[in-house]
């Protein structure tokens, strides 16, 4: 017993997790903790069908709180992930392979060498996702709420644009606020909304101090996000099956490779 006690003393202290900050929730497993995602509702989204939101409205993917067609965010931490969705819908597992760092998937290994990331006549089966752990600043009732703003598929270009806006500003991501808004697109037989981003005003002192605390807490931690394959929520004017290729301007990657 003495030997075991010595080994335990040598162990590093456990990293704090969000569950340990909430009295009474200490026994919740980290695997059950999900970061809410900023969801862009489409014509066939459940909240729209239930008359809770309109198509083009943003909402919290977990609480289902509806924000409207624009939100003001303060980006804090960027991350890139990848997901290969199942070609056919599955009830429990919604992806076949997932990479938390955009470099190595939990099933197919190296993302760089993976055949599913390659562009051909159709878009790749594995989607690259640009994520920004952010603080919501508007609407005011959601001020200081943490949310993951994820750009993929039809909104991937907006994510790349936000990356470059932050990089060329030469400051930390949370130094400025950004407006994320929805834009209607009608292309062929599809009506849908995409995400767009415009820079806003500089963050004030209190906003910067709060974001710095968020950064110090979450930096380096793996964040599990409430992802779902929402490709079937687009408004389809025909009975043909939805494909990513139909929603892109061309058959090439928006990143130029």
Image: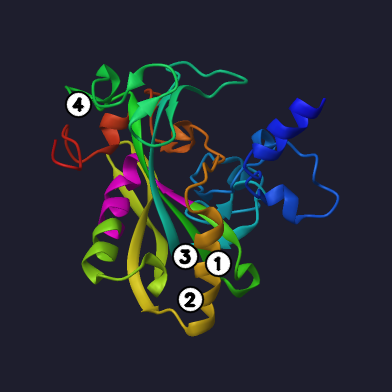
- Mark 2 or mark 4: whose residue is earlier in sequence: 4
- Label 1: which residue? 213
Distance of mark 1 from mark 2, alpha carbons? 9 Å
- Label 2: which residue? 208
Are the residues flagged by discs 2 and 4 in contact, CB closer than 8 Å?
Answer: no
Q: Main secondary structure of the magenta part?
A: helix
Say the numbered circle drawn on residue 119: 4
Outermost residue toward the right in this view: 24
* Residue depicted at x 61% and y 63%: 145
Q: Is residue 176 visible?
A: no
In terms of secondary structure, where does tag 4 sit? loop
- Label 3: which residue? 70
Q: Position of residue 26 (x, y in %)?
A: 80, 45
Distance of mark 2 from mark 4, alpha carbons? 40 Å
Give the foreground label among 1 and 4.
Answer: 1
- Mark 1 or mark 3: whose residue is earlier in sequence: 3
Which contiguous range is marked in magenta? 149-162
In terms of secondary structure, where does tag 3 sit? strand
Question: Left or right: 144 with respect to 73?
Answer: right
Are the residues flagged by discs 4 and 3 in contact, CB closer than 8 Å?
Answer: no
Q: Quadrant of the N terminus?
A: top right
- Mark 1 or mark 2: whose residue is earlier in sequence: 2
Q: Quadrant of the C terminus?
A: top left
Q: Examine the rendered structure and indicate whether residue 45 appears above or below residue 137.
A: above
């Amino acid at each position: 017993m003495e030997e075991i006690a010595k080994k335990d003393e040598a162990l590093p202290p456990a990293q704090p997790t969000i569950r340990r900050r909430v009295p009474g929730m200490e026994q919740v497993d980290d695997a059950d903790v999900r970061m809410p995602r900023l969801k862009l509702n489409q014509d066939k989204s459940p909240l729209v069908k239930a008359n809770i939101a309109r198509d083009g409205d943003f909402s919290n993917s977990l609480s289902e709180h509806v924000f409207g067609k624009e939100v003001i965010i303060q980006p804090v931490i960027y991350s890139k992930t990848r997901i290969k969705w199942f070609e056919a819908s599955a009830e429990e597992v919604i992806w076949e392979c997932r990479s938390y760092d955009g470099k190595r998937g939990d099933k197919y290994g190296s993302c760089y060498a993976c055949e599913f990331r390659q562009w051909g006549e159709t878009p790749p089966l594995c989607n690259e996702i640009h994520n920004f752990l952010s603080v919501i600043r508007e609407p005011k009732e959601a001020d200081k709420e943490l949310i993951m703003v994820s750009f993929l598929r039809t909104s991937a270009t907006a994510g790349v644009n936000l990356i470059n806006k932050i990089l060329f500003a030469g400051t930390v991501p949370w130094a400025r606020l950004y407006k994320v808004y929805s834009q209607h697109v009608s292309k062929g037989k599809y009506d849908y909304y995409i995400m767009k981003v415009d820079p806003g005003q500089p963050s004030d002192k209190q906003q910067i101090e709060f974001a710095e605390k968020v950064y110090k807490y979450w930096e380096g931690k793996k964040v599990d996000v409430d992802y779902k394959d929402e490709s079937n929520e687009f408004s389809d004017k025909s009975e043909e099956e939805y494909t990513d290729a139909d929603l892109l301007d061309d058959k090439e990657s928006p990143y130029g490779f």
